[in-house]
Amino acid sequence: MSSILPCLAGPTPIGWCTQAYTIYKLWATLEGMRSIGIRELRERSAMFIKRAGAGEQIVITVSGEPVATLGPITANATQTITLTELVANGAVVAPRRRDKYQIPKAITFNSGSRIDQTLREVRG
């Protein structure tokens, strides 16, 4: 076990020996996931994105704490969501109008016309 976790192997920085870090490192190692810090991700993001696209799961840490995972898109993540499903989930509000919306007709303007006169004509 001491070869897996740096804080169990001997003298290490005190921040590494927190319970969360120890549990996380054990979990990440057992799951076969690579863990990287946010700085390393920033420096080599293209490489890690390519690796995630190839199927690798990568755990991203901030100050030694796991905050996110980077991995391939699953089949259900790419499926489309209908408006009905969005309304049912409360993500959007259903439209109040039930009839089909028609785009208003285009208005042509003469180059010498005044806008107030044109508005009066349009509004009736």
Image (tube, rainbow, N blue to C red):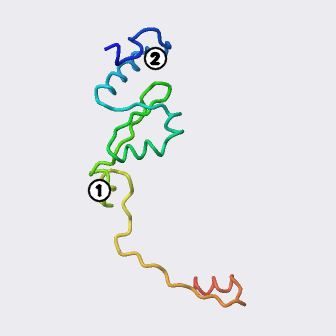
Question: Of marks 2 and 1, which one's residue comes earlier in the chain?
Answer: 2
At x 29% / y 56%, what residue is drawn? 79
Q: Give the camera-side residue of 104 and 6.
A: 6
Name the residue that disc number 2 marks. 16
Image quadrant where one finds the N terminus: top left
Q: Residues within 10 Å of mark 2 (few under 14, many from 20)?
A: some
Q: Residues within 10 Å of mark 1 (few under 14, many from 20)?
A: few
Image quadrant where one finds the C terminus: bottom right
Give the secondary structure at mark 1: loop
Q: Residue furthest top?
A: 10
Give the secondary structure at mark 2: helix
Residue 52 in percent (x, y) is at 37, 43
Q: CA distance from mark 2 to mark 1?
A: 40 Å
At x 57% / y 86%, what residue is drawn? 107
Q: Residue furthest left?
A: 75
Q: Give the camera-side residue of 90 and 29.
A: 29
Classify 87 as above or below 66.
below
Classify 120 as above or below 7.
below
Label of residue 32 in the image = none
Label of residue 79 in the image = 1
At x 38% / y 43%, what residue is drawn? 51
Quadrant of the rendered image containing residue 23: top left
Residue 69 in percent (x, y) is at 38, 37
